[in-house]
Image (tube, rainbow, N blue to C red):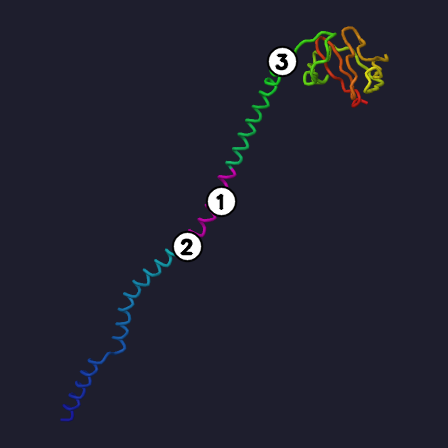
Amino acid sequence: MSFILDAIKKSEADRKKSQQTDIYSLQDQDIARPSVHTHRSRWLLLCFALVILVLTGWYLWSPLLNYISEYDAANKDVSASVVAEDALDQKETFTPVIETASTATADELMPTYSINDSLPPNHQIKELWEQPVSFQNQLPTLDFAFHVYSEVAEQRTIIINDRRLTEGQMIARGLKLHTITESGVILFYQDRFFHVDVVTQW
């Protein structure tokens, strides 16, 4: 009989054991649950990595855009300066032609005078260095040694080529001393009046 009782107690204990959760079943539940959590954590990790990538790209892209815009601006400045230099070169190339044409036109428009004419207006009397080179080369040699200017025309005198001259006298053939000025002389040669600055040459 005690053998039967022991068997009943044992079966009862086994039944109670089967109803209680054991360590192995808890481990099985813990192993099963993380599969859902692992799936969620992967998505979170992926989203976090994506946010990091976007922020990093934005952080790096901003200086890159600034560098590109500065590079474009520098290229535009360089191309603008090259265009300006080309335009300046072209201007320099064509300027002498234009100046020559304007000088010739001005010389053609200058009125011609005779040796006994009165003095023209001041704007028509140019300096010797402003005259054409061909005209300057035809002038006789002029060597100035002494210059006296006075408000009284009769007291004015100058020494040219070792000759003491007053206003109205001839220096050489076709070359006349017309007026002695405060700074030099006004001469007449080949149908034109011109001024020679004597004082600054000393």
Q: Eyeballing the image, is 182 above or below 9?
A: above
Q: Residue at the spot x=45%, y=50% of the render?
A: 60
Q: Quadrant of residue 128?
A: top right
Q: Secondary structure at mark 2?
A: helix
Type of amino acid under label 2: Leu
The one of 78 and 155 positioned closer to us in this rendering? 155
- Amino acid on which disc 1 is placed: Tyr
SS at circle 1: helix
Q: Position of residue 189 (x, y in %)?
A: 74, 10
Quarter of the image that includes the C terminus: top right
Which residue is label 3 attached to? 104
User: Measuring 72% from the left and 15% from the top, which residue is drawn there?
Assistant: 194
Q: Tell me where residue 103 sits by quadrant.
A: top right
Is residue 60 covered in magenta? yes
Near-viewer residue (168 or 91): 168
Q: Earlier in the sequence, mark 2 or mark 1?
A: 2
Q: Is 92 left, or right, of 42 in this rendering?
A: right
Whether residues under marks 2 and 3 lie with C-beta atoms below 8 angstroms apart, the answer is: no
State which region is magenta. Answer: 52-74
Tag 3, which secondary structure? Answer: helix
Q: Looking at the picture, which amino acid does disc 3 mark?
A: Ala
Percent from the top left, x then y, of residue 72? 48, 39
Residue positioned most to the front = 152
